[in-house]
Amino acid sequence: MSQTASSPANNGLMLGTLYMVGAQVIFAVVNFVYDVLTNPWDPLNAAGKMTSSSAVFWQYLIATIFAIPLILRIGLGNLKTRHPVWHEIRALASALGAQVFVFGFASGVPVWQMVGLLLTGPFFVIAGSVLFLGEKLTPVRFGASLVAFLGAFLIVGFGTDAFTWGSLLPVLAAALWSTTTVISKYLARDETPESLTLYLLLLIVVNHAVVGIGLGVLVSVLPTGTLPATLSTGLDLGLPTGDAVWWMLFLGLVTAAAQYLLWNAYKFADATYLQPFDDLKLPLNTLLGWIVLSQVPSALFWPGAILIVAASLYVGTMEGRKRPASA
């Protein structure tokens, strides 16, 4: 009997799609709250601005508390591993990526530029997989990477008013998060998806605390003003105050919700199918930033974004055709 539109397989794909789209909507909200909490030029919550290191620490601490049911659902028995050091390096790279990303908002980089440049991540993954995992650099991967970075060049806007040195922060964040992905690909040879998810959930807050303490030490030993005040002003692990408390609780809640949705999306559909929906972050974030924050993209943003998204879709489609049906 042939499958119909209501078959279990198709229902699974539909659920995976809905979960993935929902996650991208929530991540757009997350980025909006980053701007509210850390960007000194954002008029909302003007009296309760936080440093980026403090905001990220509390975000992930609260999100981890909200994610306890997910942690228990995965089961602590999945903590058995032969690669504890690689799990820690992976979590540290993820934490550093988040720190750099939120520091971009605190530096006044507009949402459209932050998210557009973050889409270069898959091409850093390709580079890391070729260099460190021994994967083959095919003409498709090489050509798509060149096109994507041409798009990134346009979005950064070198030589235009849209460019600041802070514009490079989302590129660095993309590289750090791609490091997490490459290590995940390496660990996936021996580890289960449950183990990979569990270790990241449990180690991420610890590493954000380590980064925060490290920045606090640097602030105390370096000359005054060496580190930007929007990054850290010392040991910034104190509780937020005023309206920032409610913004932070909301940020932690929606971050946990996004993790739940992603977890469920990848349960019902594979990454190759879901990848195009990940690109929805670009129009969603750009639209939200435009309407709510009055951040109008530059003229070069759209052709650059089209190049990055087209390259990502093309390489994903070509790689998907080569993958065995049982993968």
Image (cartoon, rainbow, N blue to C red):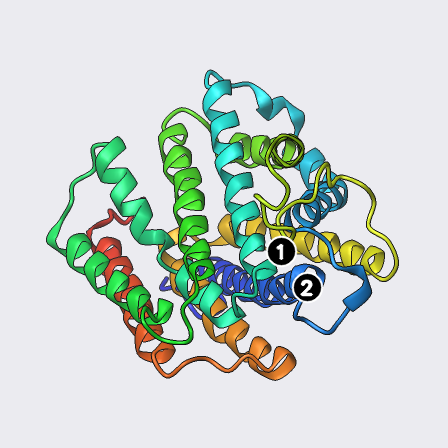
Can residue 207 be seen in the rendering of this structure?
Answer: no
**Is 85 drawn above or below residue 159 in the view shown?**
above
Residue 33 is tagged as 2
Residue found at x 20% / y 32%: 134
Find residue 154 and report its horizontal and vertical position in percent: 30, 71
Q: Which residue is mark 1?
A: 258
Q: Secondary structure at mark 1?
A: helix
Find residue 104 and report its horizontal and vertical position in percent: 53, 57
Residue found at x 58% / y 25%: 78
For the residue pair 278 and 50, the one nearer the viewer reads as 50
Within 10 Å of the Cα at label 1, are there few (<14), some (14-19), or many (20+) other Cα atoms?
A: many
Residue found at x 63% / y 22%: 77
Within 10 Å of the Cα at label 2, are there few (<14), some (14-19), or many (20+) other Cα atoms?
A: some
Q: Is residue 196 left or right of residue 155?
A: right
Find residue 258 and report its horizontal and vertical position in percent: 62, 56
- Quadrant for residue 60, please give it: top right
Residue sitting farthest toward the left: 139
- Quadrant for residue 327, please give it: top left
Whether pointer 1 and pointer 2 mark residues with C-beta atoms closer than 8 Å, the reply is: no
Can residue 32 be seen in the rendering of this structure?
Answer: yes
For the residue pair 239 and 69, the one nearer the viewer reads as 239
Residue sitting farthest toward the front: 223
Q: Is residue 67 left or right of residue 181?
A: right
* Amino acid at pointer 2: Val
For the residue pair 180 and 289, the one nearer the viewer reads as 289
Q: CA distance from mark 1 to mark 2?
A: 14 Å
Residue 14 is tagged as none
Q: Secondary structure at mark 2?
A: helix
Of label 1 and label 2, which has the lower sequence position? 2
